[in-house]
């Protein structure tokens, strides 16, 4: 029987909006070597091309908390649809801009759109659904994000084989999505006739700012390491002789498919594993994936490694957002979603800045192995930190 929240059109609306956000930066990943080759005389091409993936993240990291305040004050819809317009214009700009610096600037503007979309849709989830339902929807949402990312990145791999500019065309898919979201996502009411999933429910748990801070910190550190995959993997594959852009698309697709499957599973088992067991299991899967990637010199091993990495992300990411939203009172949900969004994207932006010197000094293999060790350490630290911060909102609830 279908989960009852999937019979709610609003659930499909927020999932569709989410497909445009967290993995949107990685859409052009297969094109990075080609884009770098387009600008052979640019002395900063090596770093700038990697920053094309994470440039939006810097703006999201800075803007998202303020976007959250705007969402709390002006409502959810206006920031959401403003963000969609910016996303379309800036995302497709790489099709025609003639300098690497101009493309980089357009990616910064793209971050404004992503910040508005992601903050508004995360707050909408907090408004539309409660407790365990909210957790399951976060899992479904991440599954939708990664399935969309799988299609986008695979398509980008094939498009990049013809021209490194063509993957920017994928951002134009937000054009037909715009009217669909306009219909599916109403502004939340302060009360609900059936008394279920109301926007006014929940005054927040005791000490909720600390819980939000823990989740935001864990999310940021996770993405510093995780985003070494979309920013460094294409170059690693070239380094080991897998230089066809389609290989990068296939390896990324393996990660996104695994993340989709595990995200759905995590939404169902999180009430039993709790807010400690779920992210700890995710961190250990991420550690296994990065360790295998450090030894993967053939395509099947690289795909298996990124599948483990995706599975780990599927466990962790819904937990970060769900735990923060469960803890926060309604009047601060926009701000909290903005803070957690900021943490995701700050980690993304910092990833190549942290990973590139390690790779230059050592190697891709040792950098990935270091990432595995850090994830094990994070699992231990998070388990100890959250041990006494359990919540009744993690208890199971029926899905039908």
Image (tube, rainbow, N blue to C red):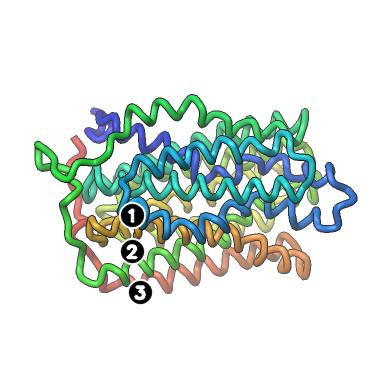
Marks 1 and 2: CB-CB under 8 Å?
A: no
Mark 2, Cα crowd under 10 Å, few <14 / some 14-19 / many 20+, is many
Residue at figure coordinates x 32%, y 29% from the top left: 184
For mark 1, what is the residue?
334
Mark 3, Cα crowd under 10 Å, few <14 / some 14-19 / many 20+, is few
- Whether residue 261 is visible here, answered yes or no, is no
* CA gap, disc 1 and disc 2: 24 Å
For mark 2, what is the residue?
276
Residue at figure coordinates x 55%, y 56% from the top left: 59
Q: Position of residue 64 (x, y in %)?
A: 45, 56
Circle 3 SS class:
helix
- Whether residue 161 is visible here, answered yes or no, is yes
Pick whichever, 163 or 59, lies toward us.
Answer: 59
* CA gap, disc 1 and disc 3: 25 Å
Q: Residue furthest left?
A: 194
* CA gap, disc 2 and disc 3: 9 Å
For mark 3, what is the residue?
385
Pick whichever, 49 or 30, lies toward us.
Answer: 49
Is 195 above or below relative to 292?
Answer: above
Circle 2 SS class:
helix
Marks 1 and 3: CB-CB under 8 Å?
A: no
Give whichever of discs 1 and 3 has the lower sequence position.
1
């Amino acid at each position: 029987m279908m989960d009852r929240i999937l019979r709610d059109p609003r659930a499909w609306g927020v999932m569709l909006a989410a497909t445009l956000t967290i993995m949107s930066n990685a859409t052009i990943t297969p094109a990075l070597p080609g884009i770098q080759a387009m600008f052979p005389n640019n002395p900063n091409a090596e770093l700038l091309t990697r920053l094309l993936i994470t440039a939006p993240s810097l703006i999201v990291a800075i803007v998202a908390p303020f976007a959250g305040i705007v969402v709390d004050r002006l409502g959810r819809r206006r920031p959401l649809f403003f963000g969609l317009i910016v996303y379309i214009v800036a995302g497709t700009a790489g099709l025609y801009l003639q300098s690497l610096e101009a493309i980089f600037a357009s990616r910064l503007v793209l971050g404004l759109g992503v910040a508005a979309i992601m903050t508004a849709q995360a707050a909408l989830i907090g408004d539309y659904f409660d407790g365990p339902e909210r957790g399951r929807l976060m899992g479904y949402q991440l599954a939708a994000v990664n399935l969309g990312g799988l299609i986008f990145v695979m398509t980008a791999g094939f498009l990049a084989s013809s021209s490194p500019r063509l993957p920017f065309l994928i951002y134009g898919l937000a054009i037909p999505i715009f009217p669909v979201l306009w219909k599916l996502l109403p502004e939340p009411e302060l009360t609900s006739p059936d008394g279920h999933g109301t926007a006014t429910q929940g005054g927040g748990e005791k000490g909720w700012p600390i819980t939000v801070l823990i989740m935001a910190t864990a999310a940021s550190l996770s993405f510093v390491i995780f985003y070494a995959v979309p920013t460094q993997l294409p170059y690693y594959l070239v380094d080991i002789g897998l230089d066809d852009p389609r290989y990068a698309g296939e390896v990324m697709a393996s990660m996104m498919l695994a993340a989709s499957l595990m995200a759905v599973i995590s939404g169902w088992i999180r009430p039993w594993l709790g807010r400690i067991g779920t992210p700890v299991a995710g961190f250990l899967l991420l550690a296994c994936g990065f360790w295998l990637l450090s030894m993967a010199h053939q395509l099947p091993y690289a795909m298996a490694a990124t599948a483990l990495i995706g599975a780990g992300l599927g466990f962790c990411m819904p937990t970060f957002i769900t735990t923060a939203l469960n803890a926060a009172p309604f009047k601060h949900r926009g701000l909290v979603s903005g803070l957690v969004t900021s943490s995701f994207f700050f980690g993304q932006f910092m990833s190549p800045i942290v990973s590139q010197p390690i790779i230059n000094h050592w190697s891709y293999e040792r950098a990935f192995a270091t990432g595995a060790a850090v994830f094990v350490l994070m699992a231990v630290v998070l388990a100890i930190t959250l041990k006494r911060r359990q919540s009744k909102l993690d208890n199971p609830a029926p899905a039908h």
